[in-house]
Image (cartoon, rainbow, N blue to C red):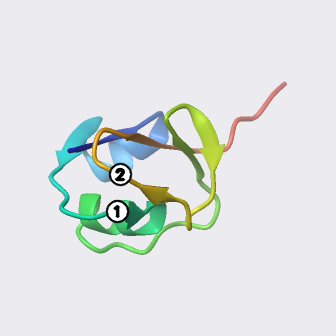
C-alpha cells in the first residue's frame, strides 16, 4: 500500500485528504497522482514529497511509502 495525502487547496480540489493505493510494483510519483486522481493530469505547479522529502514526478515509490501533494507555499 502507498499512502497518498493531499493538503490545503488540493484537498478541496481532489475531494479527499488521504487514500491508500494497493500496488504490485513501484510507481512513479506521476503514476501515483494519476491512479489517485482518476487519471487527471499532474498539475505543473504543485509540490510533491515522498516520505517527507521533496521529490519530482519521476521518483519511484514502493509499497509502504507515503506520497504527499500540496500547493506551493507562499510567504508574506
Q: Residue at x 81, y 28 (%)?
A: 75
Q: Quadrant of the C terminus?
A: top right
**Residue 13, above or below 44:** above
| Mark 2 / mark 1, whichever is N-terminal | 1
As drawn, 21 above or below 65: below
Q: Secondary structure at mark 2?
A: loop
Residue on which the image places disc 1: 26
Query: Which quadrant of the view contains residue 34?
Result: bottom left
**CA neighbours of label 1 inside 10 A, class few (<14), some (14 to 19), many (20+):** some
Q: Are marks 2 and 1 in contact (CB under 8 Å)?
A: yes
Q: Nearer the viewer, residue 7 or 24?
A: 24
Note whether 36 is above or below 63 in the view shown.
Answer: below
Can you give x and y, in whole percent of width and height, for residue 45 in the image?
Answer: 64, 59
Q: Position of residue 12 (x, y in %)?
A: 35, 42
Q: CA distance from mark 2 to mark 1?
A: 5 Å
Residue nearest the observer in this picture, 39 or 1? 1
Seen at 62% across and 50% down, the residue is 55
Q: Quadrant of the N terminus?
A: top left
Compared across the picture, whether 16 is left or right of 43 comes to left
Label 2 sits on residue: 62
Res 74 → quadrant: top right
Q: Residue 58 location in percent, x, y?
A: 56, 67
Q: Front-most of 32 and 40?
A: 32
- SS at mark 1? loop
Which of the numbered marks, if any, corresponds to residue 1?
A: none
Left or right of 23 in this view: 14: right
Q: Position of residue 25 (x, y in %)?
A: 26, 64
Amino acid at each position: 500500500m502507498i499512502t497518498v495525502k493531499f493538503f490545503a487547496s488540493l484537498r478541496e480540489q481532489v475531494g479527499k485528504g488521504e487514500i491508500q493505493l494497493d500496488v504490485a510494483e513501484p510507481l512513479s510519483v506521476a503514476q501515483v497522482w494519476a491512479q489517485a486522481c482518476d487519471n487527471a493530469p499532474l498539475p505543473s505547479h504543485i509540490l510533491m514529497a515522498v516520505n517527507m522529502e521533496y521529490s519530482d514526478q519521476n521518483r519511484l515509490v514502493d509499497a509502504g511509502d507515503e506520497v504527499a501533494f500540496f500547493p506551493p507555499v507562499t510567504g508574506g
